[in-house]
Image (cartoon, grey):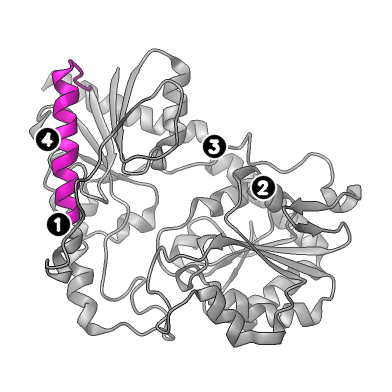
């Protein structure tokens, strides 16, 4: 088989599929992407470079589409060069989010297309307006609607759609959701797994993350996000910590994430959300017990979750992070926000605890409950691992992809 993957940030959501295909050693795999340092043996990475970004003179609501059009144009030009070198894929797989696939049909009009539809934007009822602390500005509603331009054009390309969760598919209009298949994403259960032996607390070994050292007798609360921002409940987590720290002198907290903004707005007064929350809470947050290591290496992330006594994952009604699935696979005692994306993975008191997303007092109570009830934490952690072994197996994720690819390519042969 000849595969063409397209995603602006190699390897994106396709890491595990690529590793599987490359390990087979009998497929040709080409991946068109923007420049980055990532590489994978067996995958031919072809880089495209945008000559410019969107113009400041372009209407605000059209800038994302202008950038998407530039990507579509550049990717199609790159694909045509690949075609002229003699490569014609049996299937094209890519993410629709950035517009890269919009012109790909002009290069290979007959090749099956499997496109990733991640999220359909709404001005109400999902993420926008969810948090009353940050009410939406109605003047931004046209801009939010315009963010669906690429989605809507992608739905006319005649390919096959996929998305990883029921909730994500439900964000799309009913007429569109009918043509989007759910292909659940898993977790690498060989890497993401609890230790067979008791964790470091009981072995007498500290957990060391750079300059941070968590002693064996200390309780550890963890929080992980790409960036520390309200969309992932960072402000709620920080406000909950004041009560937790006061109640448990033996608690240490590690909050992993950068200071940029992935989703939503920057603080109106400027700076970072971390600086804003530290200024708000002042001396209630003990810097000797609350740590911000920034972004950490993946193996450090795994070590942190293995050691965690309570792992907090909060999100607005928005796309759930991979880290939630990985935390469940690690057997971490998870406290998740009681929002639809999380409820698709966590059942309260079955394989984790749920808490209202925007209620710091309730969150603090849930954290303390896990810290004070070791039996409950162990039971939930074991149930989280069993859930992962049943629902998040990577071989099931790969098999589902393989079946869709087989169906689409076979249909193309017989058309």
Task: For marks 1 and 4, give the CA distance.
Answer: 19 Å
Secondary structure of residue under mark 3 = loop
Task: For marks 1 and 3, give the CA distance.
Answer: 39 Å
Q: Please state the extent of the stretch shown in magenta in the rendering.
A: 67-89
Instruction: Residue 393: give its label.
Output: 3
Residue at 51 percent of width and 66 percent of height: 259
The residue singled out by tag 1 in the image is: 66
Give percent across and percent down for residue 117.
Answer: 28, 49
Residue 131, quarter of the rendered image: bottom left
Q: Report crowding for label 4: few under 14, some 14 to 19, many 20 or more residues within 10 A (C-alpha).
A: some
Up/down of 148 relative to 5, above or below:
below
Which of disc 2 and disc 1 is earlier in sequence?
Answer: 1
Up/down of 108 relative to 320, above or below:
above
The residue singled out by tag 4 in the image is: 105
Give percent across and percent down for residue 129.
Answer: 35, 79
Task: For marks 1 and 2, give the CA distance.
Answer: 39 Å
Task: For marks 3 and 2, give the CA distance.
Answer: 22 Å
Task: For marks 4 and 2, give the CA distance.
Answer: 42 Å
- Taken as a whole, is the magenta stretch helix, strand or loop? helix
Secondary structure of residue under mark 2 = helix
Q: Judge depth for marks 1 and 3 and give the one in front.
A: 1
């Amino acid at each position: 088989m000849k595969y063409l993957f397209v995603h602006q940030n190699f390897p994106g959501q396709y890491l595990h599929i690529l590793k599987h295909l490359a390990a087979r050693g009998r497929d040709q795999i080409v991946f068109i992407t923007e420049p980055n340092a990532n590489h994978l043996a067996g995958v031919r990475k072809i880089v495209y470079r945008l000559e410019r970004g969107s113009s400041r003179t372009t209407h605000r609501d059209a800038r994302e589409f202008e950038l998407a059009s530039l990507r579509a144009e550049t990717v199609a030009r790159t694909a045509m060069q690949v075609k002229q070198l003699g490569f014609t894929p049996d299937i094209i797989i890519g993410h629709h989010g950035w517009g890269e696939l919009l012109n790909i049909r002009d290069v290979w009009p007959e090749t099956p297309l499997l496109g990733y539809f991640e999220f359909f934007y709404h001005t109400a009822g999902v993420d926008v307006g969810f948090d009353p602390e940050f009410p939406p500005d109605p003047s931004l509603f046209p801009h939010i609607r315009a963010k669906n331009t690429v989605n809507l054009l992608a739905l006319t390309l005649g390919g096959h759609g996929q998305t990883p969760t029921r909730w994500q598919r439900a964000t799309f209009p009913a007429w569109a959701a009918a043509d989007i298949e759910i292909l659940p994403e898993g977790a690498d259960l060989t890497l993401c797994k609890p230790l067979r032996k008791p964790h470091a607390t009981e072995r007498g070994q500290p957990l060391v993350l750079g300059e941070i050292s968590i002693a064996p007798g200390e309780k550890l609360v963890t929080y992980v996000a790409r960036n520390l921002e309200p969309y992932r409940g960072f402000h709620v987590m920080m406000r909950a910590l004041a009560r937790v720290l006061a109640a448990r002198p033996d608690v240490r907290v590690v909050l992993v994430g950068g200071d940029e903004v992935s989703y939503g707005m920057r603080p109106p007064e400027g700076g970072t959300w971390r600086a804003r929350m530290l200024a708000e809470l002042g001396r209630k947050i003990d810097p000797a017990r609350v740590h911000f290591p920034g972004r950490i290496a993946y193996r450090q992330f795994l070590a942190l979750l293995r050691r965690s006594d309570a792992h907090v994952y909060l999100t607005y009604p928005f796309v759930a992070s991979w880290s939630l699935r990985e935390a469940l696979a690690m057997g971490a005692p998870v406290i998740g926000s009681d929002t639809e994306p999380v409820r698709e993975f966590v059942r309260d008191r079955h394989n984790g605890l749920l808490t209202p997303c925007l209620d710091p007092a309730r969150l603090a109570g849930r954290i303390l409950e896990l810290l004070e009830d070791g039996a409950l934490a162990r039971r939930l952690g074991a149930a989280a691992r069993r859930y992962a072994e049943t629902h998040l197996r990577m071989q099931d994720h790969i098999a589902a992809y393989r079946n869709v690819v087989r169906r689409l390519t076979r249909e193309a042969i017989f058309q």
